[in-house]
Amino acid sequence: MNAELPLSHTVGEGQGEGRHRHKPAIAHLFWWFMFAQGGVLAAILLPVHILIQGILGPLGIVPVVDRHYDTWANVLGNPLVKLYLLVLIAFPFFHFAHRLRYLLVDLGVPAARGVPAQIVFYGGAVAVTLGTIYILLTTVPISFG
Amino acid sequence: MDPTSYDVLIIGGGLAGIRAAIAVAETNPRLKIGMVSKVYPMRSHTVSAEGGAAAVLSKDDSYDTHAFDTIKGSDYLADQDVVEAFVREAPLEVVQMEHWGCPWSRNADGTVAVRPFGGMTTWRTVFAADKSGFHMLHTVFQTSLKYDQIHRHDEAFVTKLLVENSRCVGVTAIDVRSGQMYAITAKATILATGGLGRIYAFTTNGNICTGDGMALAYRAGVPLKDMEMVQFHPTGLPFTGILITEAVRGEGGYLLNNQGERFLKRYVPNKMELGPRDIISRAMTTEFEEGRGFEGPHGKYMHLDVRHLGEATIDRRLPFMRELGREFVGIDIVKDPIPVRPVMHYMMGGVDADISGATLMKGLYAAGECANVGLNGANRLGSNSLSECLVFGAAAGRAAAEQVGSLAAAGANPIEAMLKDETKRVEGGFLDKKGGDERIAEIREDMQHSMDEGAGVYRTKEGLTELTRRLDGFRERFERIKIDDSSRVFNTELTAAIELGFMLDCAVAVAHSALAREESRGAHARRDFPERNDEKYLKHTIAHHTEAGPRLEYRDVTLGKFEPKARAY
Amino acid sequence: MPRGWWTRRSNYFWYIVREFTSLPLALWLLWFLLEIRRAQDGPSGYHPHSSLGFVIFSVIVLLFALYHSVTFLSLAGAILHFNVADRPIPSQLIVLSQFAAWAAASVVVGFVLIYFAR
Amino acid sequence: MTATKRITIKATRFDPDKDEKPRLQTYEIPFSDDSMVVLDALNYIKGHVDGSLSYRWSCRMGICGSCGMMVDGVPKLTCNAFLRDHWPRPITVEPLNNFPVIRDLVIDMDDFMHKLKAIKPWVIRKQPVPLGGGAFVQTTAQIDEFRQFSQCINCMLCYAACPVYGLNNEFLGPAAIALARRYNVDSRDEGLGQRLPVLADAEGVWECSFVGECSVVCPKGVDPAKAIQQTKLDTTMRFVLPFGNRD
Ligand SMILES: Cc1cc2nc3c(=O)[nH]c(=O)nc-3n(C[C@H](O)[C@H](O)[C@H](O)COP(=O)(O)OP(=O)(O)OC[C@H]3O[C@@H](n4cnc5c(N)ncnc54)[C@H](O)[C@@H]3O)c2cc1C
Ligand code: SF4
Ligand code: F3S
Ligand code: FES
């Protein structure tokens, strides 16, 4: 008699399990990890670089390594510096990629959630990483002097 | 699966109802269980209980002392066999709650802690800070989600019990969201609809505490028991009636009058702030009358002072009280005393039920605050009620589960006819009704104030007679009720109207039962009969519904090893 | 969700700003990569960037960078959860130590950048 | 006697049977007592002006979680939002954002009820524990691990505040994740492995971009934003660290 009743909101057998089967999204997990570490690095290291190399150096307020070829090349040859620069430049891009992708979602571009967008954004970060490695290896040969 | 037919149907998603549902599921996993609640279960009023649940846990405690405290607290109106069973079951239920995840507060060694409570001779109230009811309700509710056989009807409002050959075969309900009326059939039905505090104006009870289950049973022919026994809690916040838990006094708070004096020394010298609620409420009322209360914009009040406990204790044991003080009164209880006055809090009376929750009607059980299984007598001790919901909720669930095996389901034909009748009553009587000039809220407010005046902490023959007269008037006005809202969808005015009808029935039962009991016992204090009269009234009041008004009978109290004595603290 | 939801409340707006910081920071790092790349030009061809426009750009980026650092470190501090002797370390302390790490790293990097500049 | 102040309340009206879309209706009511909250104003309207206004409420003490609405655009418990903080300006009361509206100020929260069940909010044990053994031993420090997350009253304010949920309501959302964490970090529970698939699903914690507004509006200090980020961190560590225990 009540077969057609709209008791849509009664909750019972198995209704809580949701529409799809759940499994941990390993990809998300990985990109979030990269996002988090990139965020920390950017937060701790970037301001001082911008301040000194972007402002104080060009204005001539303090001497800075990258203002003269000699000192700059000297420092760039150091393998530890190369490693540091790789971390400093490449890793934050995973943070940026993640944030910008979500920013687009927040601003109403649902497509940014999809796999193609993930390939573009995280792929971009990977590309920057590869580019950084290439530049670091080709710019000043490693020297231990 | 047919969402309108169950083996066991539970009305109410509070602590008692959910506990019952789980008990059914565990007793017989194959039973189909329905749970109907007019609000989402976690909104049930159990959520606002603060202080804790009583159970014998510590080594220096015993079943006998818990039983004795309960019976003495009840002013000997409790049935002693029920109390004995209760005190033995309560500790198991408390442990069960712990296993389900209830975050009971702990001792330093990680064992479950207890705190003192009014009228208890020793520390036996387990608690989850001062949000015990909240944590217990969410714990049982979340645990109940694990049982797929418990099928919920959230926001479905029960309007009537369906009775066939003097057996309860289910209910009719309004699906509040769609406004549809429908019948739900069941082999056994458990009422767990909570209290009726809203028949009073100044109460700690929430908007949903309108005595629905009591009225449903009463109208269906099941009597109500001891309805004159209404508990007033000494410490409610003026204006809002928000409860300041007894645990505040349990933790060592002082009650002070306007002379800064712990006035309870004149009333309960041995127990002071830990005296039972009825006596302290009367003490406060007397102090007010003698001019020793503070005067505020919302009437007289006393101070409840916890400043000497220190911030650390307050934050660990009473954080919610601090929050309530800050948000609703604008005080910091670490630095300011809390204004409090007696407030209607709890209904000892209820649907007449036995030790397993069975009522006189076949197939109908009752548990929790809406039931009277004979545990609380004339005055409930603080923290016995949450334990009662667990113990007797589970008992009713088990009893119902065992009973349904032997029962056949109700036939569909008479049910359909009953549904039609009830739909006509509800839709014709309220929704599509023409004319009428009485506002629900106005009748309700008049009733509430009349109850405050006529059936408050102290009662008299004149006051109660006047009250019954007025209630008759309200019932007449209720016939001329007018509803603004003709929509079907989520019509809360319709449910409020039906609730008002339920409340009026309950109020009438309270007033008549109180008028007839010509003695003072527990919460029922008659100025014209200040003494207890065991000869005549060591009996339960049993109120039967008749068109003309309640027909009262008396039933002997079950005594046991504790002889009735004078009750002094 | 209306499109301009983030303009409706200041908290939302600052959240969007926080996320947006990544764009200027990314641009600055790309510039920095170029700066390194230019060291290939050899001693005579090497002219470090010093236009006023670049300085202004850096000032703006610095503001975003600081906003990123402050928000990221405070938020990360609120999430991290350590127990010492069964007691959780207060989150203010964790945030404080994050800021200390930031300060220390800045001093070290600044020192290297300037000390080796002879 | 001084004349009582009056206050203007604009409330959303919507009846799906009659109205195309929600509209605001204006009521002017007496503001007779400084302790009055928005809910009291609604009750006054329903009782004395217009009985057809629909909304949910029960406890009037900020614990049942049913009275959440948008008050001047901010999700709040109306039993805990004082008129005196708005007077003499009018107050706009609307149903919670991000939810379908059933009627007037009443929202449809079925979605959350399903999500709540999906995270298995009950103590999971690998072996059943008999009652006879008594209660578990749990120190106050162990309770402190989950205490905050156990304070959730399911009021839905956080969902109304979360733009991510507004954009994609497949997102598990703040309260459900906080409650999952409440069990995951309870020393009595062994169900992490069963909850993780739901939590770390694509629509689980990863969807949250840490707007943080959920924690700002939460009336009970649950800090769901923290619960979510901690879950991200924990899950990540379980996979990244070689010794992350997996079950
Ligand atoms: C402020 C406060 C503090 C308290 N503190 C304590 C304490 O510290 N210790 C203690 O032991 N006790 C305490 N109590 C008492 C105790 O909390 C209650 O007695 C107990 O919670 C009642 O539980 P219940 O399950 O019977 O009813 P409730 O929790 O009230 O549940 C009633 C259920 O019935 C449903 N219902 C009602 N009518 C209908 C209908 N017509 N159709 C469908 N469903 C319906 C409701 O939706 C609800 O789900 C306190 C009470 C209050 C008010
Ligand atoms: S987390 Fe806070 S805001 Fe969200 S539902 Fe729970 S109590 Fe409400
Ligand atoms: S607002 Fe939403 S995005 Fe995350 S931090 Fe809270 S859930
Ligand atoms: S009415 Fe219960 S939380 Fe507001």
Image: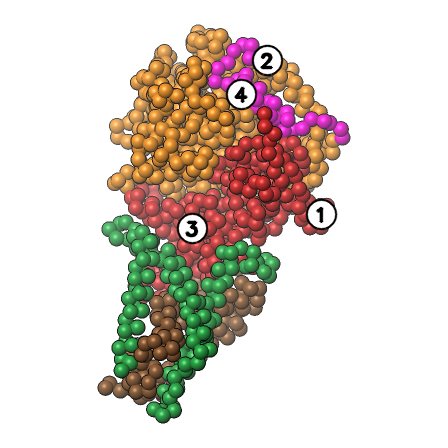
Chain colours: A brown, B orange, C green, D red
Q: Residue at x 65, y 28 (%)?
A: B440
Check disc 2 and report the residue beneath it: B466
Check disc 1 and report the residue beneath it: D19
* Mark 3 residue CB less than 8 A from any atom of ligand 2: yes
Please give left or right for residue C81 compared with residue B159 in the image.
left
Can residue D185 be seen?
Answer: yes
Q: Label 2, secondary structure: give it.
A: helix
User: What's the CA distance linking mark 2 and mark 3?
Assistant: 53 Å
Q: Residue at x 71, y 25 (%)?
A: B480
Q: Amino acid at mark 4?
A: Asp
> Pointer 4 and pointer 1: residues touching (CB < 8 Å)?
no
Q: Residue at x 51, y 34 (%)?
A: D35
* Chain letter for mark 3: D
Name the one closer to the observer, A95 or D200: A95
Which of the two discs, 2 and 4, labels the residue nearer the N terminus?
A: 4
Q: Is residue D8 above or below residue A14?
A: above
Determine which of the numbered discs, if any, sits on residue B452 in the image.
Answer: 4
Q: Label 3, secondary structure: give it.
A: loop
Task: Magenta stretch: give its range.
Answer: B434-463
Q: Residue furthest right?
A: B434
Main secondary-structure element of the magenta-colored stretch:
helix
Which quarter shows the C terminus of chain B?
Answer: top left
Q: Label 4, secondary structure: give it.
A: helix
Check disc 3 and report the residue beneath it: D223
User: What's the CA distance linking mark 2 and mark 1?
Assistant: 47 Å
* Mark 1 residue CB less than 8 A from any atom of ligand 4: no
User: What's the CA distance linking mark 4 and mark 3?
Assistant: 41 Å
